[in-house]
Amino acid sequence: MRSSSIPTRCAPVACLRGALLCLALAASSGALAADDRFAQAQAAFAEGAASGDGEHPAYNRARELWRALAEEGDPRARYHLGILHMYGLGDAEFDRQLAVSHVRAAAEGGYPMAQSLMGFMIEGSDGTLIVSGDAVALAWWRKGAEGGHCTAVRRLARAYGNGELGLSADAAQAAAWAAREAGCSKN
């Protein structure tokens, strides 16, 4: 039985913000449209997000398509299943542990967006749901950046510039990552 203090669904505004953020991140990666089923799932997700209703049935269409792709080994689909569970969208149960499991599998499968999200989640973790620590977060951020995910590139530029994530401030490394950031799109 769930505690009454844990929501089963996200608040509509938070749901919409989270869904739109994830959609914007997904839409910014050119490789995502290569598979027609994936593109159909993205379109369904966008429909759900545009509705502002976290229980919109379009999320369920996206989930079914992504589930089938995930079973075929597509790490992008695993990532998006994680997002659905992270926010409890459609009929996807609000389950942070399951969400992290999907995102981690996608990250381990080499999906840069998931690697960046792992870095973000670990960096902000208190250690209860996911391991915490600067070295682990840095490793995921680096994998995401090396895979071309611009959010991770920006995070490394800032980490080197400010001496964050257990790094010593290093102007040369900060400049090198900032130069890579200049060629990034808006993901």
Image: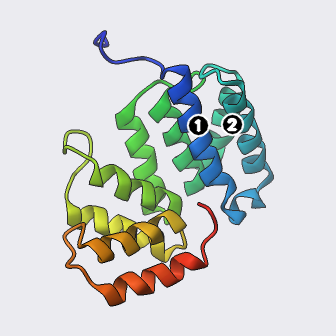
Q: CB atoms at circles 2 and 1 under 8 Å apart? A: yes
Locate residue 4, reporting x and y percent: 31, 9
Disc on res. 6: none
For this orientation, the residue located farthest to the bottom is 172
Locate residue 65, reporting x and y percent: 69, 39
- Of the numbered discs 2 and 1, the one sitting upstream in the chain is 1
Q: Is residue 139 left or right of residue 14?
A: left
Viewer-proximal residue among 34 and 5: 5
**Residue 154, above or below 65:** below
Residue at x 32%, y 76% (from the top left corner): 161
Picture quarter containing residue 29?
Answer: bottom right
Secondary structure beneath dot 2 equals helix
Locate residue 51, reporting x and y percent: 71, 25
Question: Amino acid type of disc 2?
Answer: Phe
> Which residue corresponds to mark 2?
45
Color theme of the render: rainbow
Viewer-proximal residue among 110 and 117: 117
Secondary structure beneath dot 1 equals helix
Picture quarter containing residue 8?
Answer: top left
Is residue 98 shown to the viewer in this render? yes
Q: Compute the Cα span from label 2 to label 1.
A: 8 Å
Q: Is residue 106 left or right of residue 23?
A: left
**Residue 24, above or below 175:** above
Disc on res. 19: 1
Question: Amino acid type of disc 1?
Answer: Ala
